[in-house]
């Protein structure tokens, strides 16, 4: 993929910023141009937040309505809050505990089962997207970056495990 | 040898400053500017670069501290959010007349939207008011690149120079080339010249004349010339843009050949002062000109009458008068300007979950106690995480930094203590240091009787846990000292001061009741310090044991814990009973105190 626009939507505290950074650093390691945009400040206290990530030759840090190639919704309720990103070409993956018209999985529950921390749901959903081949990067590339960004070897192990759960689920159906 | 790094716009600005020899930087945190000083401190420490980089008590103090360095020939910078520049407006305007020796940059970050601010004000307009040149970067990379040009401009003309990024530059990330840092400290020289550095009104008139001449020279510099972004040949209409909206427009043209075929796009790097001669020359071939900028018509006002063709922009109602100029707004506008059908409007968005105080936030317990001790009161508050006390009905006003104290006094004078209308003001520890001390002295000296609850969580939480003067990590040198919040309050002259931990809810409530009595009897301001560390702050140790709690069958689903206390870890379970979400619960146990049915117990 020469160009990719990825939107990551969630609630403050769900690790939207971490996913954005992980993907941006991965793109850099691949020698690609990156632009991203983040939500900071008050909204980070549990409010609805969104990150935009653009890999390839772009100028604006924001994605225009309907132009996202991939939209990751860490909170299902945000489908109504950030609806504009989704266009005809958008792949939508949702962290959801119920079947819905979009593709997705119950990342929160899977994270809790696999690593005992619901907070790892961001990486479960990312693993799922990687497994489905929806991202500009290969899994190994993302794992390399994850290793660099994880604070401790133990944290990396937990993070990699969460990613693996998502990857594993992506091949099931 | 350089290396490429992914930098946030604020980090790119920080990198630009220290790569270009900045040896003093000062700031007060505020979204979207907070990460600039954080990044300077981190990069300088990691790469052994010598710089005095301090968090200051407020923006005015930051400005004046760094300015002194520039008086002595060193390169200095001060960074803040746009409303911080209001606080520093006095030295900002005055220093434009006096000027500097070493390069002096003012980074004032605007927040169109607004996403995390009380206004959408345009710092470029303040630069124009102050007669200070301002550069308007369109991306993190450009923000970094412009620092070198800004320092050159500042030193050539001995004038402060503003860099004005917006949220979408500050909080964008981009791959940016970084150079190794090399120390090149200059020997400080202060040349005595009272006619300049301490100018009286008579000399001020002379300085004003000199400032006007500087601006004329600056407007004639190459940096002020408009830059052609695409091939202007054969186009009938022109767009003149500055800031991140230029990036939105550039991308729109790249993606829609119909726009690129019709529009000539120009970037202005320095929206004030404009090089009007160069602009008139560049724009002469076009039948119509559109001005694209955020948030005020700064270029548009200067360009009035410049060309004898229609000039379209915010002043003519072409652009909305409020709100962020997103890529969608820009794209639709460019289509309209070109006579193309504009894309369908975006689907309506639901408001989305509102931000809330975190589970276990000590502020929540403190607010709850305040409402219990001072029922039916007036609750002026302030700027910080605790503004979210609004969700609990514990925040009635939020004006600007430090206003809670003076407004608390104002409400107290308005009602009088005999009216029985209590006033309970709340302010955070960092905000109190920032601008709460002068109004507290004022309240003491005028006998304003109200309760002032200082929410001391040991950090500036909202902006990313920057230190306050009460903390050792505020200091940049070993000779610094911490400043005690309670001693500062006592020194203001208050006769009632008590400190409590809101997690010890019942005892804390008693303190607030005593404070309420003191104020009701007209004893002057009663200060209560609510002291408990922010749970999100990695710099502070947890002071409580994380215990598990559960809701028992005594729960009658009265909703008090959810609607009035508002802890996000307490949700309706579906069986007419509340449940506690273990992954969110911080185990503070305050809900067990406030549950009227005593239906929450330790597991």
Image (cartoon, coloured by chain):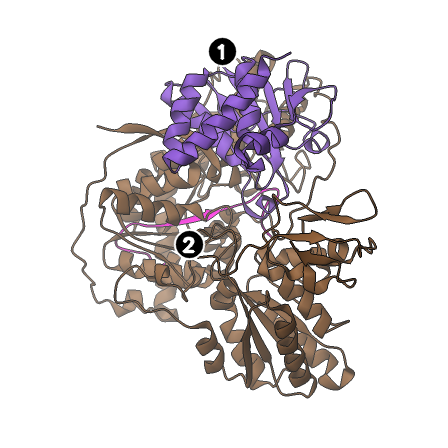
Q: Are marks 2 and 1 on the same chain?
A: no
- Residue numbers of the magenta segment: B97-117
| Visible residue check, residue B365 | yes
- The quarter holding residue B599 reads bottom right
Would residue A72 appear left or right of A83 to someone viewing this image? Answer: left
Q: Nearer the viewer, residue B8 or A71?
A: A71
According to the colouring, which chain is purple? A
| Visible residue check, residue B224 | no
Looking at the picture, how far across and down is residue B404, in whole percent?
A: 61, 68
Contact (Cβ within 8 Å) of mark 2 with mark 1: no
> Which residue does the numbered mark 1 point to in the structure image?
A1
Tag count in the figure? 2
- How crowded pointer 2 is (Cα within 10 Å; few <14, some 14-19, many 20+) is rated as some
Looking at the picture, how far across and down is residue B598, in whole percent?
A: 75, 62
Q: Is residue B103 magenta?
A: yes
- The chain ID associated with circle 2 is B
- The chain ID associated with circle 1 is A
Give the vertical position of B281 relative to B596 (above or below): above
> Which residue does the numbered mark 2 point to in the structure image?
B539
User: What is the drawing colour of chain B?
Assistant: brown
Would residue B291 appear left or right of B549 to someone viewing this image? Answer: left
Q: State which quarter of the image contains the N terminus of chain B.
A: top left
């Amino acid at each position: 993929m020469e160009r990719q626009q990825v939107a990551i939507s969630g609630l403050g505290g769900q690790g939207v910023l971490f996913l954005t950074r992980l993907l941006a650093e991965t793109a850099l390691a691949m020698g690609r141009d990156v632009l991203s945009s983040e939500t900071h400040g008050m909204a980070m206290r549990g409010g609805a937040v969104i990150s935009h990530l653009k890999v390839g030759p772009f100028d604006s840090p924001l994605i225009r309505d309907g132009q996202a190639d991939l939209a990751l919704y860490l909170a299902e309720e945000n489908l109504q809050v950030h609806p504009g990103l989704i266009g005809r070409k958008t792949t939508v993956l949702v962290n959801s505990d119920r079947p819905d018209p979009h593709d997705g999985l119950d990342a929160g529950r899977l994270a809790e089962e696999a690593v005992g921390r619901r907070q790892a749901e961001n990486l479960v959903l990312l693993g799922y997207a990687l497994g489905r081949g929806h991202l500009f990067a290969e899994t190994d590339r993302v794992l390399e970056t994850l290793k660099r960004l994880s604070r401790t070897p133990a944290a990396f192990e937990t993070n990699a495990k969460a990613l693996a759960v998502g990857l594993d689920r992506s091949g099931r159906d | 040898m350089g290396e490429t790094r992914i930098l946030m716009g604020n980090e790119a600005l920080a990198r630009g400053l220290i790569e270009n020899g900045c040896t003093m930087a000062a700031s007060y945190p505020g979204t979207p500017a907070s990460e600039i000083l954080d990044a300077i401190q981190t990069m300088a420490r990691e790469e052994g670069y010598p710089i005095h980089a301090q968090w200051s008590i407020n923006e005015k103090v930051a400005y004046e501290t760094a300015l002194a360095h520039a008086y002595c020939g060193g390169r200095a910078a001060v960074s803040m959010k746009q409303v911080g520049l209001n606080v520093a407006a006095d030295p900002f305007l005055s220093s434009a007349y006096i000027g500097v020796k070493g390069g002096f940059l003012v980074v004032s970050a605007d927040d169109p939207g607004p996403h995390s601010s009380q206004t959408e004000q345009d710092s470029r307009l303040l630069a124009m008011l102050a007669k200070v040149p301002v550069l308007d970067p369109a991306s993190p990379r450009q923000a970094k690149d412009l620092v070198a040009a800004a320092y050159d401009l500042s030193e050539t003309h001995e004038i402060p120079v503003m860099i004005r990024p917006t949220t979408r530059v500050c909080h964008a990330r981009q791959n940016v080339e970084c150079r190794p840092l090399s120390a090149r400290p200059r020997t400080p020289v202060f040349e005595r010249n009272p006619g300049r550095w301490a100018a009286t009104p008579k000399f001020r008139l002379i300085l004003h004349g000199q400032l006007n001449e500087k601006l004329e020279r600056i407007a004639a510099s190459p940096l002020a010339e408009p830059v052609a972004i695409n091939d202007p040949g054969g186009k009938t209409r022109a767009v003149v843009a500055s800031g991140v909206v230029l990036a939105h427009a550039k991308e729109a043209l790249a993606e829609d050949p119909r726009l690129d075929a019709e529009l000539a796009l120009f970037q202005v790097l320095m929206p004030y002062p404009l090089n009007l001669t160069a602009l008139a020359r560049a724009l002469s071939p076009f039948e119509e000109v559109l001005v694209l900028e955020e948030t005020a018509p700064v270029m548009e006002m200067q360009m009035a009458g410049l060309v004898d063709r229609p000039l379209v922009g915010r002043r003519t109602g072409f652009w909305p008068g409020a709100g962020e100029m997103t890529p969608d707004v820009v794209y639709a506008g460019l289509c309209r300007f070109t006579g193309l059908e504009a894309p369908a409007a975006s689907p309506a968005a639901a408001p989305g979950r509102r931000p809330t105080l975190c589970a276990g936030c000590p502020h929540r317990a403190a607010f709850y106690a305040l409402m219990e001790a001072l029922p039916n009161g007036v609750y002026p508050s302030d700027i910080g995480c605790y503004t979210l006390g609004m969700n609990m009905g514990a925040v009635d006003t939020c004006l600007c930094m430090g206003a809670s104290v003076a407004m608390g006094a104002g409400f107290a004078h308005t009602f009088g203590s005999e009216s029985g209308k209590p006033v309970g003001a709340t302010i955070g520890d960092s905000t109190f240091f920032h601008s709460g001390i002068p109004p507290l002295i004022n309240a003491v000296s005028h006998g304003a009787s109200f309760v002032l609850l200082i929410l001391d969580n040991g950090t500036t939480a909202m902006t990313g846990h920057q230190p306050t003067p009460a903390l050792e990590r505020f200091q940049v040198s070993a000779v610094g000292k911490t400043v005690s919040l309670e001693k500062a309050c006592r020194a203001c002259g208050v006769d009632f001061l008590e400190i409590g931990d809101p997690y010890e809810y019942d005892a804390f409530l008693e303190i607030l009741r005593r404070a309420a009595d003191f104020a009701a009897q007209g004893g002057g301001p009663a200060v209560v310090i609510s002291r408990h560390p922010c749970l999100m702050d990695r710099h502070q140790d947890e002071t409580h044991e994380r215990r598990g709690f559960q809701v028992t069958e005594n729960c009658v689903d009265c909703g008090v814990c959810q609607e009035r206390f508002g802890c996000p870890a307490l949700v309706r379970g579906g069986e007419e009973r509340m449940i506690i979400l273990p992954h969110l619960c911080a185990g503070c146990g305050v809900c067990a105190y406030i549950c009227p049915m005593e239906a929450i117990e330790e597991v």
